[in-house]
Image (cartoon, rainbow, N blue to C red):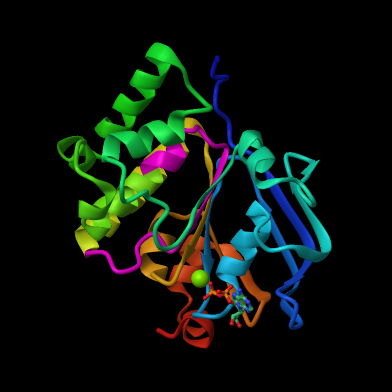
Amino acid sequence: MTTEPLAGAALSIRDLTVGYGGGPVLHGVNVDLSPGEVVALLGANGAGKTTLLGALTGRVPVTSGALSLDGKDLRGMRTEDRARLGLALVPDGQSVVGELTVDENLRLGALWRHRGPAREQAIQRIYEMFEPLDRRKLADGHQLSGGERQMLALGRALIAEPRLIALDEPSLGLAPLVVAQIMRTLRETARERGLTVLLAEQNVTGALSIADRGIVLNLGKVVVDADAATLAEDSALRHAYLGF
Ligand SMILES: Nc1ncnc2c1ncn2[C@@H]1O[C@H](COP(=O)(O)OP(=O)(O)O)[C@@H](O)[C@H]1O
Ligand SMILES: [Mg+2]
């Protein structure tokens, strides 16, 4: 299988309403991501960040509105077809398989994307990106620290060479140094590959430090959509929606 050159995908979410059966959780959400843009998706616990990512991957059904990646309608599309289009999700909690080694987990991520020497090169690139994983190649997933597990989850998503990666609170529960490394790697990968990133975070400072733009969800609605630097400096906005 050949790997075409990477370029970020554009995401368009129009007037999206989504719920779990007991009434809507997201109300008329509009979000646009340009290719290569890094966007922080912010908001308190329960604001709807995970639900929005679920609508992207197809785990949460769309009630009304539109959702497209590079102009391709995602509604009704199977999760694996969305992945083939270049959409990757790093869920909160564990997508790492505890019974498999670090190396096996990475191979799993590379399975449908790369073959033969290209696969070995792709795996090697992830080890270069995350040195702690290189040292833990043969450790089982369940032996890893929280930080190592998050790096592996991210590495496993990146190895499939997505065009848009959505991450659900990757910094949750991790030490500041590990968070910094993960954020830096994301930023660098986005720059080098033109990858589009949607980063759901409660760690506002960390997320805004690498984002181009920040979107704040409050009770299932977009209440702020602004340049990251503006958002980081606007203390009234931060007080109103982000609690600091
Ligand atoms: N599986 C579910 N079934 C019903 N309601 C849910 C489910 N998951 C989340 N919710 C509700 O949707 C709202 C948004 O939750 P969520 O998207 O998890 O927010 P966040 O990720 O920003 O913390 C909350 O009110 C939550 O209780
Ligand atoms: Mg969440």
Most foreground residue, 67 or 212? 67
Q: Residue at the right extreme?
A: 64
Quadrant containing ligand 1? bottom right
Tell me residue 14's x, y (percent): 79, 60
Residue at position x 55%, y 27% in the image: 6
Most foreground residue, 160 or 231? 160
The quarter of the picture where residue 213 lies is bottom right
Whether the magenta-drawn stretch holds residue 173 is answered as yes
Tell me residue 194's x, y (percent): 52, 35
Residue at position x 48%, y 21% in the image: 114
240 sits left or right of 110 in the view? right
Say which quadrant the N terminus sits in: top right
Residue at position x 36%, y 39% in the image: 105
**Which span is picked out in magenta?**
155-175
Q: In the figure, 5 relative to 15: above or below?
A: above
- Looking at the image, can residue 159 be seen? no
The quarter of the picture where residue 233 lies is bottom left
Residue at position x 56%, y 46% in the image: 37
Whether the magenta-drawn stretch holds residue 95 is answered as no
Tell me residue 176's x, y (percent): 23, 63
